[in-house]
Image: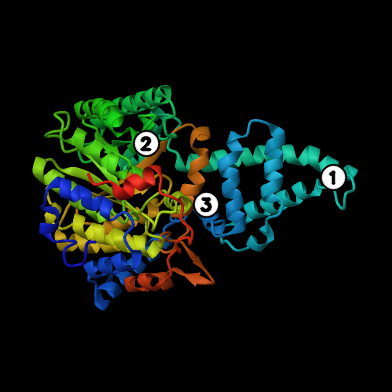
């Protein structure tokens, strides 16, 4: 296991690529407490450093709260009904299922099942937004209406209950569908790439840029993969044309791709097939992107696909298609215990070839499923950190490495976060290192935060907006869960403030405290290791 003495040492990454690749798998399920203690030591922040960063974070938050545009109504709604409330879970279930239900009877049954038992009364008056409170009134009345239709003590519904059912539930059903569409539009830039580019213009004019993601599920068939390939190719073409018309000072937009969308058997068991077919497919897209001067980024996916994704990336990066380009990048998830070894490997790869790798550092998007998968397979440990504080520490340790002189000219850092404290820490680290970098955020979130943060950033720093592009029906199952993971956890959201909890309390929690809070326990029983989990643990390069 890496320790504080060698995590940022140049000798650690200046080794053979095969050795560095093997180290990635060795960190699959390292002990969380021991590893986090080493990460905390790497940050080496004393009390004065912490207080200075916390003070700057508080100033940033205060400025954002004073802006008229600081709090979007959707943000307030997501905070009031976050996933740590029963009602928030009910809304998430509706958001994920409502637009996929084809018949009215099932939709009515779902509304009754999810909204009827919830305690909406407890949320009355808890928000400063009149619109959120009005929405709560609507949900409260909806819950009462759908509950009226249930027979009491085995007796048939009365005439008035039947009347409410006939007149109320169709109206409620329609209102719920429209509400889900409105909320979906908040987080989806456009139904297709042309609409997305049109809606991008206002923020292009403010100096922001975009990374467009043609949102969709993993390919199940060759036909699915071909359709996604065509979507990506069209996006690259359209984005390339748009880039030519942008002012010279505006950073060029990019396109993000998912490997699982481009091959129906993107899995370790089909490694040899994937390294031939998928590499060829992505090389075609990379050639199109290079010809049109559009940066291309490979998105991160589940942890058991990490090694094979790195093999695919390396094969394309070292090909003639990408040599001398410097705009073919990928995403690394900091909640993975292997994030820092991955950075060492990529830094060495770039050092050997000489082409800079744009690298987007995120905190991670599949935490729930990774924990569940590990428990189901009986893996001895988790491949991801089980505590949010541990992920925050790992993110900052990775940021320190990315902003160090060791990655200069090899990796271009792109920091994706909505956490005000993380932003302030990155600004502090960048001032010390004097390195160029960019921030990234999700479309529909954090605009006011970054308007304020960029004023404090070094000259030339900008923010790239990660923008999903898809029909609302396609992306509705995922947007609410993703936004609920990002929005409500203090100090991630700058407008989190209630009479019971103030953000400033969170800002004063030392990094060292994260190692003392309990992690998710490993289940006592064990299943035999199978398939991808075993491959991820034992893979040696």
Q: Of circles 1 and 3, which is in front?
A: 1
Left/right of residue 5 with respect to residue 528 in the rendered view = left
Q: Earlier in the sequence, mark 2 or mark 3?
A: 3
Looking at the picture, how far across and down is residue 434, in whole percent? Answer: 14, 58
For the C terminus, the quadrant is top left
Give the image quarter of residue 394. Answer: bottom left
Disc on res. 73: 3
Q: Residues within 10 Å of mark 2 (few under 14, many from 20)?
A: many
- Residue 12: tell me if it is visible: yes
Give the image quarter of residue 62. Answer: bottom left
Disc on res. 455: none
Looking at the picture, how far across and down is residue 174, in whole percent? Answer: 66, 37
Identify which residue, 346 or 198, lies in the foreground: 346
Question: Tag 3's secondary structure?
Answer: helix
Spatial distance from mark 2 to mark 3, Cα to Cα? 25 Å
Q: Earlier in the sequence, mark 1 or mark 3?
A: 3
Q: Earlier in the sequence, mark 2 or mark 1?
A: 1
In the picture as drawn, the residue positioned furthest to the bottom comes out as 47
Q: Which residue is mark 2?
A: 213
Q: Is residue 105 above or below residue 516?
A: above
Identify which residue, 124 or 383, lies in the foreground: 383
Question: Tag 1's secondary structure?
Answer: helix
Whether tag 2 and tag 3 are in contact, CB under 8 A, the answer is: no
Disc on res. 161: 1
Identify which residue, 44 or 313, lies in the foreground: 313
Looking at the picture, how far across and down is residue 271, in whole percent? Answer: 30, 34
């Amino acid at each position: 296991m890496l320790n504080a003495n060698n995590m940022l040492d140049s000798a650690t990454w200046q080794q053979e690529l095969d050795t560095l690749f093997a180290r990635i798998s060795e960190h699959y399920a390292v002990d969380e407490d021991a590893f986090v203690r080493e990460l905390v030591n790497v940050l080496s922040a004393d009390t004065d450093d912490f207080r200075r960063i916390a003070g700057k974070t508080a100033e940033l938050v205060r400025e954002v709260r004073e802006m008229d545009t600081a709090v979007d109504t959707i943000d307030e709604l997501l905070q009031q009904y976050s996933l740590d409330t029963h009602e928030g879970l009910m809304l998430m279930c509706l958001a994920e299922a409502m637009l996929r239900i084809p018949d009215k009877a099932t939709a009515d049954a779902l509304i009754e099942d999810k909204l009827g038992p919830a305690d909406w009364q407890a949320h009355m008056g808890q928000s400063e937004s009149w619109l959120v409170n009005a929405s709560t009134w609507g949900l409260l009345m909806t819950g009462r209406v759908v509950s009226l239709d249930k027979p009491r003590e085995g007796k048939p519904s009365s005439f008035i209950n039947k009347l409410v059912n006939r007149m109320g539930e169709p109206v409620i059903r329609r209102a719920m569908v429209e509400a889900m569409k409105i909320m979906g539009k908040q987080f989806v830039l456009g139904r297709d790439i042309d609409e997305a580019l049109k809606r991008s213009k206002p923020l292009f004019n403010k100096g922001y840029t975009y990374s467009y993601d043609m949102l969709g599920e993993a390919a199940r068939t060759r036909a699915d993969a071909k359709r996604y390939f065509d979507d990506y190719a069209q996006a690259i073409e359209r984005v390339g044309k748009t880039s030519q018309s942008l002012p010279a000072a505006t950073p060029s937009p990019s396109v993000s791709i998912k490997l699982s969308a481009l091959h129906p058997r993107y899995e370790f068991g089909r490694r040899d097939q994937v390294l031939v077919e998928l590499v060829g497919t992505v090389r075609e897209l990379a050639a199109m992107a290079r010809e049109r001067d559009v940066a291309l980024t490979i998105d991160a996916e589940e942890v058991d696909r990490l090694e094979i994704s790195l093999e695919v990336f390396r094969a394309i990066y070292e090909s003639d298609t990408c040599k001398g380009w410097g705009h073919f990048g990928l995403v690394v998830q900091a909640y993975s215990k292997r994030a820092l070894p991955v950075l060492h490997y990529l830094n060495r790869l770039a050092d050997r070839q000489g082409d800079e790798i744009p690298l987007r550092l995120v905190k991670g998007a599949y935490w729930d499923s990774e924990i569940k998968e590990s428990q189901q397979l009986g893996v001895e440990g988790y491949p991801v950190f089980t505590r949010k504080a541990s992920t925050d520490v790992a993110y900052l340790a990775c940021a320190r490495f990315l902003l160090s002189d060791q990655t200069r000219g090899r990796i271009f850092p792109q920091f994706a976060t909505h956490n005000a404290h993380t932003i302030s820490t990155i600004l502090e680290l960048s001032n010390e290192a004097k390195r160029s970098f960019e921030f990234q955020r999700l479309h529909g979130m954090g605009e006011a935060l970054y308007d304020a943060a960029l004023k404090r950033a070094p000259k030339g720093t900008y923010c790239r907006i990660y923008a999903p592009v898809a029909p609302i029906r396609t992306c509705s199952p995922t947007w609410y869960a993703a936004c609920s993971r990002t929005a409500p956890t203090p100090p991630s959201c700058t407008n989190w403030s209630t009479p019971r909890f103030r953000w400033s309390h969170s800002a004063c929690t030392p990094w060292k405290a994260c190692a003392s809070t309990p992690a998710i326990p490993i289940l006592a029983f064990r299943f035999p290791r199978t398939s991808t989990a075993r491959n991820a643990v034992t893979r040696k390069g």
